[in-house]
Image: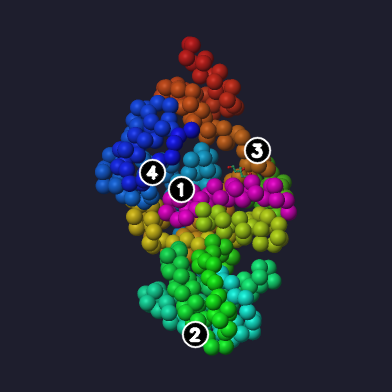
Amino acid sequence: MNSPVEGFSKLSKTDKINWIAHNCTDDPEATIQLLERYWNSDSEVQKLHDEFIENTLSNYYLPFAIAPNFLIDGELFAIPMAIEESSVVAAASKSAKFWLEKGGFKTEILGTEKVGQVHFIYKGDAEKLKSFFDILKPELLSSVSSITKNMEKRGGGINNIELRDFSDKIDGYYQLHCTFETLDAMGANFINSCLEQFAATLKEQANMFEAFSEEEKNMEVVMSILSNYVPNCLVKAEVSCPIAELGNDDMPAEEFAKKFVQAVNIANVEPYRAVTHNKGIMNGIDAVILATGNDFRAVEAGVHAYAAKEGQYSSLTHACVEDGIFKFWIEVPLALGTVGGLTTLHPMVKLGLEILQHPSAQQLMKIVAVAGLAQNFAAVRSLVTTGIQKGHMKMHLLNMLNQMGASEDEKKQLVEHFKHNTVTNASVQEALKNIQTQ
Ligand code: MEV
């Protein structure tokens, strides 16, 4: 157990590294060497990363990869993905190729509305609050005109402000529920700045509202913050083809379509399966979100809330067969940005966006939804045919060999060997031993 430290953030980077190495690790010298080995050799790049967060000691790498051949609304994309899980990019690429030959992915933006709320407590006459709100609303809008000016010039801004009454749930609890259009920005700073001004204006105007008693004037703002639940910032992506085109080496087309739809339906009605089903979707979504510098925690939180919007956690994708046509689609809320934040700062993020041809936020929503759908298609296809372990363990083979300390030559031989043999921890260990003792 290490002891508390005062003023850690004010120490130099070297002192921070020394402190952590000597207080929390078994081999301080090895820790220092490791942290330094992961520094970027370009000091400018390292400085940039150091300044993203507080107390940076080093960098934490994730592989940055490309899944090519995604045909989306008639346009071809190579999708950048940042992820550590071995089979994800391979699965995405396989799905992309499969659907490329069948017309590709079709997408549609169903909404782009973002949400923010001022939560406050008012213990007075509800009717008086409603009349106050009618007077307050134009004041709220004009109080943020300097913040919204530029956004409005580009066609965005505040869509609406509603007074919502939750006093039946918590005594005196009301909200200003606000909706925004933030165009290509994710909009967190814009929304939060507007909300904090709304809160100040609310207090100020309440003080001046003559019909309020002293207690009513003294309403209490609890907090002002955007919501990551964005059910009206929604995108749909879809694939479809005649059933006959679904045939593969592992299963006849009719049987495959039937089992696939059954698997998706199971995820629709059964939360244990739905969570794993959606986790597979998020493998694709998060990888693109990370590669494009967006906030995966925000997306995760919003997506899972959306998956539970009917009162039970359920699948984000749906599938059916109608008149001999197999259809598979996803509807997913995604509040994304392609300007501001990391998008202009992180060199790899900039590259990711360049590879995607500098998409607007709406285009990025479509690409991300497609990555989720493609990932889910690959996972469910494996699950209802060969099972996932075969492909997964093949992809994991290099990790296992690295862990076992195999040389480059041994890895080459064993990758060849396991093209025709089943990968398990024991079989890899044995095959490596065989080569080493030959
Ligand atoms: C593994 O990361 C994801 C899967 O479990 C998803 C699924 O079961 O649909 C394969």
Q: Is residue 146 magenta?
A: no
Lower position in the chain sequence, tag 2 or tag 3: 2
Q: Position of residue 58 (x, y in %)?
A: 36, 40
Residue 208 marker: 2
- Mark 2 and mark 1 in contact? Answer it, CB < 8 Å: no
- Mark 4 and mark 3 in contact? Answer it, CB < 8 Å: no
Q: Position of residue 178 (x, y in %)?
A: 53, 73
| Amino acid at dot 3 | Gly
In the rendered image, the residue lying farthest to the front is 214
What residue did someone put label 1 on? 81
Q: Mark 4 vs mark 1: give the one in front.
A: 4
Q: Is residue 328 above or below residue 215?
A: above
| Amino acid at dot 2 | Met
Q: Residues within 10 Å of mark 4 (few under 14, many from 20)?
A: few
Disc 2 versus disc 3: distance between alpha carbons?
68 Å
Q: Position of residue 191 (x, y in %)?
A: 46, 68
Residue at the (64%, 81%) spot, across then down:
126
Colour treatment of the image: rainbow
Q: Residues within 10 Å of mark 2 (few under 14, many from 20)?
A: few
Nearest the eye: 27 or 320: 27
Residue at the (43%, 40%) spot, across then down:
4
Disc 2 versus disc 1: distance between alpha carbons?
54 Å
- Predominant secondary structure, magenta span: helix
Q: Which residues are magenta?
A: 269-296
Lower position in the chain sequence, tag 1 or tag 3: 1
Lower position in the chain sequence, tag 2 or tag 1: 1
Query: With 391 as the anchor, is 141 left or right in this view?
Result: left
In the rendered image, the residue lying farthest to the bottom is 210
Residue 387 marker: 3
Residue 6 marker: 4
